[in-house]
Amino acid sequence: MLPFTRKKVPVLGIDISSTSVKLVELNPTGNGYKVESHAVEPLPANAVVEKNIAEVEAVAETIRKAVKRAGTKNKLCALAVPSSAVITKVITMPASLNEADMETSIQLEADQYIPYALEEVNLDFEILGPTEKNPDTVDVLLAASRSENVEMRVAAAEMAGLTAKIVDVEAYAIENVYPLLPEFDATREKVVAIIDVGATMTSINVMEQGKLAYTREQPFGGKQLTEEIMRRYGLSYEEAGLAKKEGGLPDNYVPEVLEPFKETMANQVHRFLQFYFAASQQAAVDHIILAGGCASIRGIDEMIESQIGTPTTIANPFSRMSLASRINPQRLADDAPSLILACGLALRRSFA
């Protein structure tokens, strides 16, 4: 097949978090996307520690289970490395350079921006467009991550029988999915904080006029709630996690355990916003979008909106998509806040 006739094909978006592997498969339709399959598969304890893969074989086996659960035949995937493991820098280059010459020049200049030996990193770049007030140069986004961060994820996917075609950065995958969120139409010209509260890590990605302007990660997540349930009711970690999702805990659970955790989560969101305000020219955000497993806690959006005074909604990147017949709509809706990153990766397409 000649190069100019090659078609881009869908890839599986695979999010490897500290406690689970999440998979989303999308297909473009005439006016949007169709959800073909999805899965959430729990990881063994300590297989991934604060987003660093510790046990490649365990992660590979979990990916394999997620693929089987999803029922997909697609063997191509897109992965992401944590934003905290990536160095990014916007540099200017002469607009007259073609892509090959630009790649050569960037390789030569990159060592002044990257604090590691170049043979130890995976390096990539994207041309953002002409430099403001200088038509002779273009702004180029340079991204670099230690090779081990990329290679561990690629190895896990390959051991699971997949081919990793794309390795993205988590924050850019979130930026990629933002236009699909129902809040986008009303907020594209505003300042929006997408806050993803997972099991062990929380990330904030702030969009200013639709573009990623700030990102930060901190250890905090739903594991704290699970551990408190374990301690309070004498359950194993697995039993506590199940009870948290499915209910059946004593009457004092909500007032004495869940409500204090919600308060702590609201305080963490407030803290994240303070970090952003200190690092930017902004003094407020116009909207908060909650993602991650903790976003599914009933009433958390209302509590955060009440305490911070900012409109707050729960992320659902699938709300305007069509669904394949095998998709359980209720299960997808329940999982939607935690699938935002996998969805952003599934929006990427690759040459087969």
Image (tube, grey):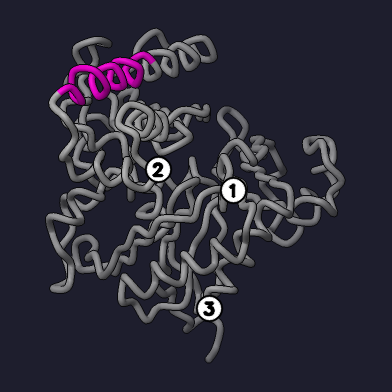
Q: Which of 202 and 348 is in front in this view?
A: 202
Of the two numbered discs 1 and 3 in the rendering, the one whose residue sits closer to the viewer: 3
- Asked which quadrant contains residue 87, the reply is top right
Answer above or below: position of 121 versus 190. below
Q: Mark 2 points at which residue?
A: 237
- Asked which quadrant contains residue 232, the reply is top left
* Lower position in the chain sequence, tag 2 or tag 1: 1
Could you give the CA–CA distance between mark 3 and mark 2, rounded to whole angstroms?
Answer: 30 Å
Q: Position of residue 154 (x, y in %)?
A: 61, 64
SS category of the residue bearing label 3: loop
- Asked which quadrant contains residue 8, the reply is bottom left
Asked whether, in this view, residue 249 is left or right of residue 150, the answer is: left
> Which amino acid does the dot numbered 1 rest on?
Ile
Q: Give the range drawn in magenta.
A: 252-267
Could you give the CA–CA distance between mark 1 and mark 3, rounded to whole angstroms?
Answer: 33 Å
Residue 161 — which label?
3
> Which amino acid does the dot numbered 3 rest on?
Gly
Q: Which of 157 and 147 is in front in this view?
A: 157
Q: How crowded is mark 2: few (under 14 residues within 10 Å), some or many (20 or more)?
A: some
Magenta segment, prevailing SS (helix, strand or loop): helix
SS category of the residue bearing label 2: helix
Residue found at x 30% / y 31%: 233
* Lower position in the chain sequence, tag 3 or tag 2: 3
Answer above or below: position of 163 versus 206. below
Q: Examine the structure image and report whether residue 263 is included in the region drawn in magenta.
A: yes
Residue found at x 41% / y 16%: 273
Answer above or below: position of 327 versus 317. below
Q: Where is residue 331 in the image (x, y as percent from the top left)?
A: 18, 56
Residue found at x 16% / y 26%: 299
SS category of the residue bearing label 1: strand
